[in-house]
Amino acid sequence: MIKSKYEHMIAKKGWSEAKTRERLGIHSGIFGICCNILLCASKFTIGSLTGSVSITADAVNNLSDAASGVVTIAGAKLANKPMDEEHPFGHGRLEYISALIVSFLIFLMGFELGKSSIEKIINPTQVSFNPWLVAILMGAIVVKLIMAYYNNILFKLSNNINLKAVRQDSLNDCIATAATVAALIISSLTSFNRADGIIGLAVAVIIIISGIDIVKDILGRLLGQPPAPELVKSIEEIILSHSEIIGIHDLIVHDYGPGRIIASVHAEVPSTADIVEIHDIIDNIEKEISSKLKIVICIHMDPIVINDEIVDRYRALAAEVINKFDSRCTFHDFRVVTGESHTNLIFDLVTPFDKNKSTPRIIKELAAEFKKKDEKINIVVTVEHSYV
């Protein structure tokens, strides 16, 4: 119901992808602030009436949780700021930075819980069973589950990584609170007072692990990770749908934040083609990719010789040798320079990142494989890695 409501709102208002991320981020932040303030007020009231220090302390914790909502709103607003002279690619990566702040709050929760749990294991204390405390904690679990559910829907609609972090933060709160309830019950039914600390420490480890997963995701986007296979496939399909393009290689995708992607690629075209005609075709392809995928792309023309008996024969030989050398390797920009004493095969070799060999060794071993086929062959190779 919530999802369909937001889908209708997005369609009705005609929000762009960037605007959708901003608006849903703001909605998430406001919802989180309201829920946490409500929990804070409820716990503080009950804590004051019952004289429970633990409930009052938990109220303060909910007040600090409201900070995640403030960070989410700020990140959504700042990330959608237009480009300027100092930031010609926009401010989209601020979304990742704000999500990183939320993940640090998750780490802080995990470390604080771990610290207090270790203290309780070393110096266990009698835990008294308080019906008011259990009722409040169960209510908090329900509210946090609603928050996690709500943020999960908004995350799927917007792919705003901030909302993924906030969703995990709410789930962590649920786990921590449920563990507290379990510890209360165990301690009240048995004389094992260390149960509270042991369960708390286990939850702290779970929370820290979840924080590490989120940080890895965020840092991958900040440092530059490979583009999604679906995006690569879409770019390839659009370019290769034009019969004048024989093949592509060296696709590089730069992510400057959601909706701010810049790419470059080499397109192989027949060396006999009219350069003005090919240039016009490539211009149209760039516009098509920009329109369909919202990507600014620069396509470099690579003229290659086709339908030449000598080149085709050596290209087939190179494919055979390279596939035998390592089936994961590919090659491109293939050229042949023949001579009386030797024949140069010039090409770029794309190797996997996990190939545990230096570039000189790769070239030496590959050259030896070619020599087995023909002593006159000399290879001139540029070894590189794929960016996708």
Image (cartoon, grey):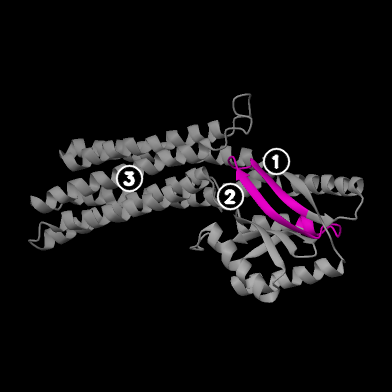
The kind of residue tagged 1 is Gly
The kind of residue tagged 2 is Leu
Q: Which residue is mark 2?
A: 157
The C terminus sits in image quarter: bottom right
Measured in 3D between alpha carbons, the distance from the residue under mark 1 to the one under mark 2, in whole angstroms, is 14 Å
Earlier along the polypeptide chain: callout 2 or callout 3? 3
Residue 253 painted magenta: yes
Measured in 3D between alpha carbons, the distance from the residue under mark 3 to the one under mark 1, in whole angstroms, is 38 Å
Helix, strand or loop status at disc 2: helix
Front-most of residues 260 and 145 = 260
Q: Which mark is residue 14?
A: 1
Q: Could you tell me residue 20's position as x and y percent?
A: 61, 41
Q: Which residue is mark 3?
A: 107
Within 10 Å of disc 3 (Cα), the crowding (few <14, some 14-19, many 20+) is: many
Earlier along the polypeptide chain: callout 3 or callout 1? 1
Q: Could you tell me residue 180's position as x and y percent?
A: 23, 53
The residue located at (10%, 63%) in the rendering is: 190
The kind of residue tagged 3 is Phe
In-image side of 343 versus 119 (left or right): right
The residue located at (9%, 52%) in the rendering is: 122
Q: Please, is residue 109 above or below residue 189 in the view?
A: above
Q: Please, is residue 91 above or below residue 134 in the view?
A: above
Residue range of the region highlighted in magenta in the rendering = 238-267
